[in-house]
Amino acid sequence: MKHYPFLEPLTLNNGITLKNKIVMSPMTTMSSFYNGMISDDELDYYGIRSSGPGMVITAVANVTDDGKGFEGELSVSNDDMIPGLKQLADVIKKDDTKAILQIFHAGRKSNSKILRGNKPVAPSSIAAVYPVDSETPKELTDEEIHDIIKAFGQATKRAILAGFDGVELHGANTYLLQQFYSENSNQRTDKWGGSREKRLTFAMEVLKVVHEIVEEFSNPSFIIGYRMSPEEIEKPGITLEDSLYFADKIKNKVSYLHLSIGSYKRTSLNNPNDKTPIITQFAKTLDNQIPLIGVGSVESPEDAEHVLSYGGNLIAIGRELIREPKWVQKVQSGDLASLRTSISPFDLDELKIPRVMQTYLKESFYDVMNFTTDKKNGSNYQSKLAPMEGFEKKL
């Protein structure tokens, strides 16, 4: 049986050891209740996927009501959420898998319908370029900015009380943390905007309050991760050089850095002459001071090995864990022949995929799902799921 290095443990700088280097990507289920409470469907979904990976990162949870980005979104905005979140943490942590709650504020990537009549908020009163019908948000006041920073801290406290092993700050996919760093969405002239260093202020203040909460209510073993998108296609927008600078500035303040990219092989979107994989460039900047999570189109053990060879330290798997919940266990046992590489719509209930999520996959990803018809057996559709890491960008 082949030995895979990604099945070996990895110890973080805070002393916490992950039993292997596989991470379940944070993927939207759209299946929480209307108020953001966890549903039984979601608990079942995580339950059959949690034993294998060394770490599971949940779907994103909003830290305030006005930070909600889409319907069916998990919430950590108030104490009423703690009992359900405790159930979620308990489900994930069986078999010594570490449970990470991803937290965020959607900022301008929301709308007044989702926010029940309230306007979305953002660093500046500038509508997002995509989608084209994005609403113009309300510019946050200084007081409101401080309130949101405090909300990230309170969300972290609730994660601690619920029993999570850590939180991941979702600073990717053009949500609020990224909006403050982007010259496209942040055109303020006060201490929160202007120069690149000033645009970094919001993220640094959020990290500061999160550390303060951890120091008061937990211990140094609590994991603090950060997720970022390396580039924006908007002009002006975040460049790869901006993100490498950002990574260098926060690497002594986080337990790991998690990229949001569609393929681990991806090179720069904006510089076709740059042929060095993005993962490799971030690995050089981090210099093994903290682990780097490589992600994107990882389906086979060979893909996972390639992520390590590119410079990643941890490997996030998304869609493959949707269609093959026991991916890690089967690779460990050498049972590669039984790895499920495609799924039928008739498999979705067996795979504990929530009904709302099923509909979303079928409707929003139909154009990138490879449907075929088995004429002999009638309607026997086989579909290979499209890349889904960070697929909440579609919403």
Image: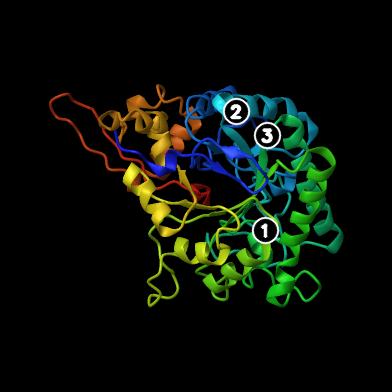
Q: Earlier in the sequence, mark 1 or mark 2?
A: 2
Q: Residue 246: x and y, percent?
A: 63, 66
> How has the structure been colored for display?
rainbow
Q: CA distance from mark 3 to mark 2?
A: 8 Å
Judging from the image, what secondary structure is the residue with disc 1 in? helix
The residue identified by callout 3 is 164
Q: Please state, as top left, top right, bottom left or bottom right, where the N terminus lies in the image.
A: top left
Judging from the image, what secondary structure is the residue with disc 3 in? loop
Q: Residue furthest left?
A: 376
Q: CA distance from mark 1 to mark 3?
A: 22 Å
Q: Earlier in the sequence, mark 3 or mark 2?
A: 2
Q: Residue 143: x and y, percent?
A: 87, 59
The residue identified by callout 2 is 93
Q: Residue at x 65, y 33 (%)?
A: 34
Judging from the image, what secondary structure is the residue with disc 2 in? loop
| Dot 2 amino acid type | Lys
Question: Which one is closest to the eye, mark 1 or mark 3?
Answer: 3
